[in-house]
Amino acid sequence: MTYHLEGKVALVTGASSGIGEATAVALGRAGATVVVAARRVERLAALERRLAADGVKAAALALDVTDEAACRAAVEHVVGSFGGLDVLVNNAGVMLLGNVEGADTTDWTRMVSTNLLGVMFLTHAALPHLLARRGAVVQVSSTAARVVRAGSGVYNATKAGLNAFSESLRQEVTERGVRVVVVEPGVVDTELPEHITDPEARASRERRIAHLRQLKPSDVAEAVLYAVGQPEHVAVNEITVRPTDQT
Ligand code: NDP
């Protein structure tokens, strides 16, 4: 299927690796102007060059989504540079698994600040612009929003909270033309688990997924593209994409 996003401006957070990077590439190939945001600017610069070599209009933007002022400035920068914003992909996230008992609670602060508050700040800043252009916001949630496990409670809470926030937002804005899309991937082969600080939690996840043929980031990017590539009257609200091997 070919999608046409010419004339659209997209902001993708967490685009320095994994699903965000693949999503930026997919949206760019479909014709969108893509602003790629994250903290590791050298990675973003390399992606910007790759996109430009493919003929995609792209720009890299340093952004820590936990910083509310930076989120507002990022949206204003995109609108000032490219005249508006049509698609916000809230993809930046961290998954710092571990039990509640004895947890390093700084992991909790990082997860809530990034996966939940960061999404809220950016969505709030982007909303007037998305309303002006009848745009879309894509939330990269997780099957962790639906399936709760011991050792994953705070990550589960952030993704379940993200789904709740998104459904409330959908009801608020859908009649004014803004589409809210929640994408829930299962296990995807990315750098995400490398940041887990609890060695036992990390080992336990590795054992649990050892038998799986994991999704590739591009598998999830295709789902995002499908959702935002639909005609304006079609709102794809929720997509769950799991590896076939994942129960
Ligand atoms: P990666 O670790 O490859 O990507 C995470 C991205 O988030 C990086 O680009 C990172 O960039 C960015 N990021 C993290 N913290 C911040 C921050 N404070 N400000 C800005 N950017 C930040 O993992 P994935 O691609 O797998 O993760 C992307 C999303 O997909 C996450 O929301 C994750 O929860 C979700 N997901 C992943 C699954 C998987 O199995 N991999 C399954 C289900 C959902 P930088 O460090 O440069 O800032």
Image (spheres, rainbow, N blue to C red):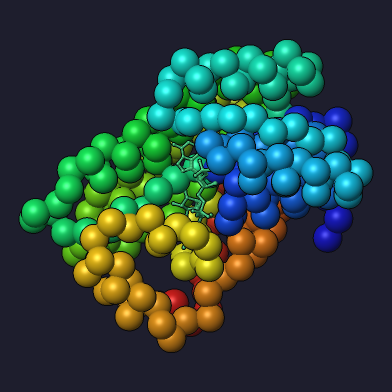
Query: Looking at this view, is 57 or 140 the one in front?
Result: 57
Say whether residue 6 is left or right of residue 212: right
Q: Where residue 197 sits: x, y (%)?
A: 28, 56
Q: Where residue 246 sits: x, y (%)?
A: 44, 77
Query: Looking at this view, is 109 or 232 the one in front?
Result: 109
Q: Is residue 87 visible?
A: no
Residue furthest out toward the front? 42
Q: Where residue 38 sits: x, y (%)?
A: 56, 37
Image quadrant for the C terminus?
bottom left
Q: Name the residue: 57% across, 70% down.
A: 215
Q: Is residue 123 above or below residue 56?
A: above
* Number of marks drawn: 0
Q: Is residue 61 visible?
A: yes
Q: Name the residue: 64% across, 41% down.
A: 42
Say whether residue 62 is left or right of residue 53: left
Image quadrant for the N terminus?
bottom right
Q: Name the residue: 71% across, 17% down.
A: 79
Q: Quadrant of residue 134?
A: top right
Q: Is residue 82 above or below residue 207?
A: above
Residue furthest out toward the right? 55
Q: Where residue 126 sits: x, y (%)?
A: 58, 21
